[in-house]
Image: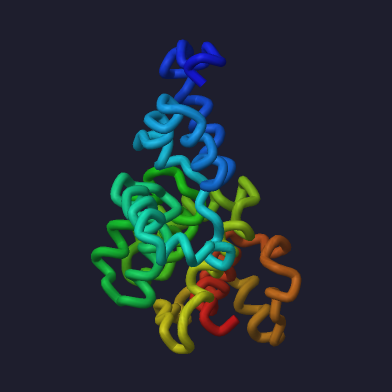
Amino acid sequence: MEHLSTALELPHDVWLAIAIKVATNSIEDLCSFCMTCCVARDVGDEETVLRMVAIPPPYEMNWWWIRDPVGRRFFERCFEIGHPELLFREALRELYIRRNHAIGWEMLQNAASNGFDAAQYALSMELLIRREDSEAKKKGLELFRMLESGGLLPACFSNCFAVLAISWPNEVQMPEKGDDHTVCDYRRRAAERGSVHGVRGADHIPCIWCRADYEVERYVDIPRI
């Protein structure tokens, strides 16, 4: 390529922008990009690029990548530099499978602080479940409202489900939700009528607290779906 192209003369910022664009498409595309020339190889190995690489859902992961030493080192490096998707997945495993709450909580907060939607969703659910912490519930509701207004709740729930559904029976232990989450007359009347408003989802529920409560119920029921 050194003899056939002037691409090596491009500024580093241009190479970096190209590498990020490629990385956000797929791991395979990033690998192909890195094999084009020495500059692409070096830029594609930068932390800024690896932090942006698209990680496929767990059910689409090529397990050969995990068994292969090169693939394993790639994912380990992405995790070490703080790739939000990998941090989020490991946080859920630490919280609900390995029961290492302190470690999982820290990972989840880190992933959420990077703006990863699914991590913010899981964080909001964890905060809303806390029965005696009004400040935590308030922050959880703010996150929930932000995700709801952006129409992101279904995708976030699916992301959590994809991580936790690939596990052995009874391996996932979700937090318990108390009855004190029933907080308004609408929800109380629906319960008295035996109305399962989940059939139509939560969009028709006027109370923001009850919509959040409905989502919490879905979240803690993931192992039983």
Q: Residue at x 42, y 32 (%)?
A: 41
Image location of residue 217, percent across then percent down: 54, 75
Image location of residue 224, percent across then percent down: 55, 84
Q: Quadrant of residue 192?
A: bottom right
Here the colouring is: rainbow
Q: Residue at x 53, y 62 (%)?
A: 61
Q: Quadrant of residue 13?
A: top left
- Pick the residue in front: 162 or 75: 75
- Pick the residue in front: 186 or 96: 96
- Pick the residue in front: 43 or 48: 43
Image location of residue 200, percent across then percent down: 75, 70
Is residue 224 visible in the rendered image? The answer is yes
- Position of 44 with respect to 26 (left or right) is left
Q: Residue at x 35, y 37 (%)?
A: 47
- Position of 6 with respect to 112 (left or right) is right
User: Residue most toward the front?
Assistant: 3
129 shown above or below 121: below
Is residue 127 visible in the rendered image? The answer is no
76 shown above or below 18: below
- Position of 215 with respect to 178 (left or right) is right
- Pick the residue in front: 99 or 66: 66
* Quarter of the image with the C terminus in it: bottom right
Q: Residue at x 55, y 69 (%)?
A: 161
- Position of 56 with respect to 72 (left or right) is right
User: Residue most toward the left?
Assistant: 102
